[in-house]
Amino acid sequence: MELFDNHKKLFTTAAAFFIGLTTLVAIIPAVQTDKINQPLPGAVKLSPDAQKGKAIYVANGCIACHTQQVRNLDMDKVWGKRPSVAADYALDKRPDVWHNTATLMGSERTGPDLTNIGNRQPSKDWNLVHLFNPRAVVKESVMPAYPWLFIYKEQPAKTDIVVNVPAEFMEGKTGKYVATKKAMYLLAYLQSLKQTDLPDGTTAPDFLYKQAAAKTDAAGGGAKVDGAALYTANCQSCHQASGEGLPGAFPPLKGSSVVTGDNLELYVGIIMNGYTGREKEGFGPMPNVGTTANLSPEEVTAIINHERSSWGNSAPEVKVDDVKRFMDAAKLSAGQ
């Protein structure tokens, strides 16, 4: 056949088939999928700083250990209010013609999922210390440190973002570490990761294979919510396993007048709606942990009773009914 004897015709025909098949199999379906899967109405585009932070996230291979997808499994409830849907990724676009889209959904969870980390852990202080050395806030962490994102200065300028590094991680240095622009860009990206609410009237997918949230109480034969486990999952990264917090960043719960006091309404309100009342003392704002994690009255009660009876604290137990009453009041005050 002349086609096989003429290399120009052969390569032209092969190229036409390749371009045609690529258009039919890849390009047209991709365009149609892009039209169908629009961003959720409340979705917010990344700011310029967050875009730069995303590039740093990609460059440092953070996807190797962190996912950004909440599966429809009950065990994933700690990572988001609902399972992820296709529309959550609709704003992920190609950064330029030479690079593919980086959705960063991931497949490994050596570290926790980051889908909703902007709500779960919005603290600037915590994130910067964590990036400087993860062991400073999570003793058991296997995440690598990123000290090159920070600069050591004997006398920081007034405009510098000082990182509250604990003394044991300063290696005897008397100055301060300050965040570079790259560190702040990465912080902006992490703080932007917030799960968007579905439109009113839209039913969220169910979490499947529900696990029992209680542990057997051998002494009473009943069930008891594990306050220690809930504290570890929701509070320990800031307030530490010792309850002593981190100086200059997170206040201690050990000996705290709020924890051991009688003002349960204030206590529950802090857990559900967050707190900014100690910023003048140098402590960062506390996020609304209870609301973000969708904690039940039984779970909030278990956390409170754990904190009131640990680290030398010896306050009386609180009752679920009282906690529920104040949780309802906290929701009203927050306009929920």
Image (spheres, grey):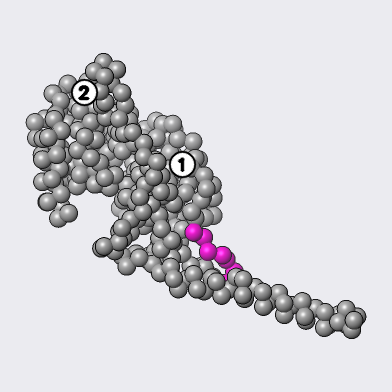
x, y (%) of residue 312?
Answer: 22, 20
Can residue 278 be seen in this snapshot? no
Q: Position of residue 4 (x, y in %)?
A: 88, 78
Dot 2 falls on a residue whose secondary structure is loop
Snapshot quadrant of residue 11: bottom right
What range of the chain is rendered magenta?
97-103
Observer able to see residue 71: yes
The residue under the point 86% across, 82% down is 3
The picture places residue 330, in percent across and down from the top left corner, at 13, 46
Locate the N terminus and report the quarter of the image it occupies.
bottom right
For the point 17% across and 54% down, the residue is 336
Figure check: 319 above or below 210: above
Residue for badge 1: 111
Query: Among all residues in the image, which is located at the extreme top?
Result: 219
Q: Nearer the viewer, residue 144 or 90?
A: 90
Residue that badge 2 annotates: 309
Q: Residue at x 24, y 18 (%)?
A: 220
Kind of residue indicated by mark 1: Gly
Spatial separation of the CA atoms under disc 2 and disc 1: 30 Å
**Magenta region, main secondary structure:** loop
Depth check: 2 or 52 in front? 2
**Mark 2, other Cα within 10 Å: few <14 / some 14–19 / many ≥20:** some
- Whether the magenta-drawn stretch holds residue 28 is answered as no
Q: Is residue 118 left or right of residue 271?
A: right
Q: Amino acid at mark 2?
A: Ser
